[in-house]
Image (tube, rainbow, N blue to C red):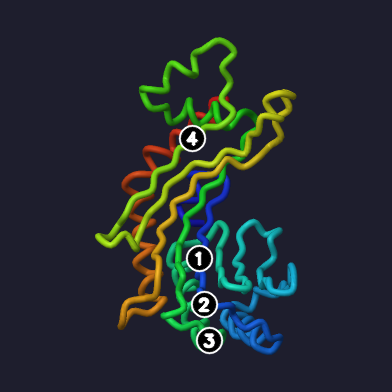
Amino acid sequence: MHRYVNCSDDFYVNLNLNTEMELTGSRETVLHFFELIQRKYPTMQNFYSRDRNDHVLEENKELGNYRWCSVEKKRVCSGYVNPDSIQSVIEQNHDILDLAPHALSVSPLDCESINVMFGFDFTYSGNHNQLIAEALGVAPAFEGLLNTPASNAIAYEPTIQFAMSEDCKVQCRINVESRTSAYHIRTGVFPEEQLSCYVTARRFGSLPAGKSYVDVCGELTEICIDMVDNHVMEQLLLPLQQTIAMK
């Protein structure tokens, strides 16, 4: 497993290619696309449709680490849960983006957006919002609010989004997501849910001349790796992991 897996209970990388026009939904085209993927990754054997325009090919989820790919009405997605290496994720995403333009007729002009997301899940039974505040702290202007009588945070999900290019077409978003609701707090019943941290790099619009989906995916992946290694690991992931361990 990759070292990122040690920072959380589950680590995964997702790729989403969103198109302006609807993808072809013909039976032959979709099956041919998945057959080409399966030739590259023979262990991806589970094929099913969630609805008429949402088709999925994946490995056995029970193994704990698995690949998956889906074709939707206006989106092609790929993911790898608990990968053995980042390189294996990169190769999978590149293989799918190599196939999509020809097999699914996805032109570089047809790109609404493409994004790569690194996700980190922590299993925790308790108030996720209070945990996030304790592990990561809050802005000085809000510190006193958590100390008011009967204070019990029901929504605290830090998020920051910033441009990575002058035209703002390339952006990065880092956010922490709680699964605790007011119902959980009111009843005092906290099921084991996933508290998540996401690092997402996204490019909007048609691709520049001379650039392929593979090129853009590589650039977005590098942004995510840089953010995790130089900012998210020490400032977000380890504090969350350590605070949960002390509970």
Which of the numbered marks, if any, corresponds to residue 82? Answer: none
Q: Position of residue 122 (x, y in %)?
A: 57, 41
State the residue position of label 3. 105
State the residue position of label 4. 240
Q: Position of residue 161 (x, y in %)?
A: 38, 48
Which of the numbered marks, if any, corresponds to residue 15? Answer: 1
Q: Which amino acid does the dot numbered 2 rest on?
A: Ile
Q: Which amino acid does the dot numbered 4 rest on?
A: Leu
- Viewer-proximal residue among 132 and 83: 132
Tell which tag, 2 or 3, sits nearer the viewer.
3
User: Height in image: 136 above or below 48?
Assistant: above
Dot 1 or dot 2, earlier in sequence: 1
Q: Secondary structure at mark 4?
A: helix
Tell which tag, 4 or 3, sits nearer the viewer.
3
Dot 1 or dot 3, earlier in sequence: 1
- Residues under labels 1 and 2: Cα distance? 10 Å
- Residues under labels 2 and 3: Cα distance? 13 Å
Write down the quadrant of residue 166 in the picture. Answer: bottom left
